[in-house]
Amino acid sequence: MVTACFFHHLEKTENMTGAPLSQASALPGNLLRRCHQISVAIFLRKCEAHNLTQLQYITLSALEEMGPIDQITLGGYTALDRNTVAIVVRKLEERGLVTRRRNPEDRRSMLVTLTEEGERLRNDAEPQVAEVQEEILAPLSESERETLCRLLTRIADENNHLSRVPVRQAG
């Protein structure tokens, strides 16, 4: 459906006189932006009791899986730029969910470690995070959900090199 809408849009864009807002609103990039806004709103509502954002959750998840790592590497695994990862880590540190200390192997970098409280919060939030995903995908059938996730993964993976902050694959 999006593909059909997009190609219909392409046919009309040679002359943007008809309905430019409708045409621009049908662009895949704009649809992804709107879906992101919706995703953030649902996440904040569902995880309000945990006082947790999507960026904080992905950061806690990365630290739980990877163990103590420097902030730059953490940003690579979570696709967060240096400034954003520093802000997210600082806020998590203020809440006692992570600790930071100078890397003894490279005094210029900071090692970030998940605390027991941080691991507990991430685990406690997991059911709400699952509810977020369910609510986001609620309009779709099971087959459509699988297709959407497969296609979004493909778009993200195959365009990773175009990102300002490409994801660094774990392992």
Image: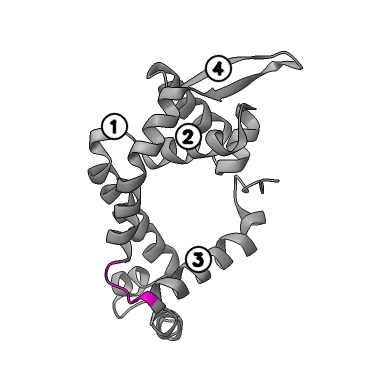
User: In the figure, is residue 156 to the left or right of 145?
Assistant: right
Determine the main secondary structure of the stretch shown in magenta.
loop
- Image coords of residue 47 (percent x, y): 28, 41
Q: Residue at x 45, y 23 (%)?
A: 116
Residue type at mark 3: give it: Leu
Question: Which of disc 3 and disc 1 is earlier in sequence?
Answer: 1
User: In the figure, is residue 13 to the left or right of 129?
Assistant: right
Asked if labels 2 and 3 touch by Cβ distance under 8 angstroms, the answer is: no
- Image coords of residue 75 (percent x, y): 58, 36
Tell me which segment is drawn in magenta: 138-142
Q: Residue at x 33, y 77 (%)?
A: 141
Q: Quadrant of residue 12?
A: bottom left
Reading the image, the residue beneath label 2 is 60
Reading the image, the residue beneath label 3 is 152
Q: Residue at x 38, y 82 (%)?
A: 1
| Mark 2, secondary structure of its residue | helix
Packing grade of label 2 (10 A; few <14, some 14-19, many >=20) is many
Residue farthest along the right direction in this orientation: 105
- Image coords of residue 110 (percent x, y): 62, 19
Residue type at mark 4: give it: Arg
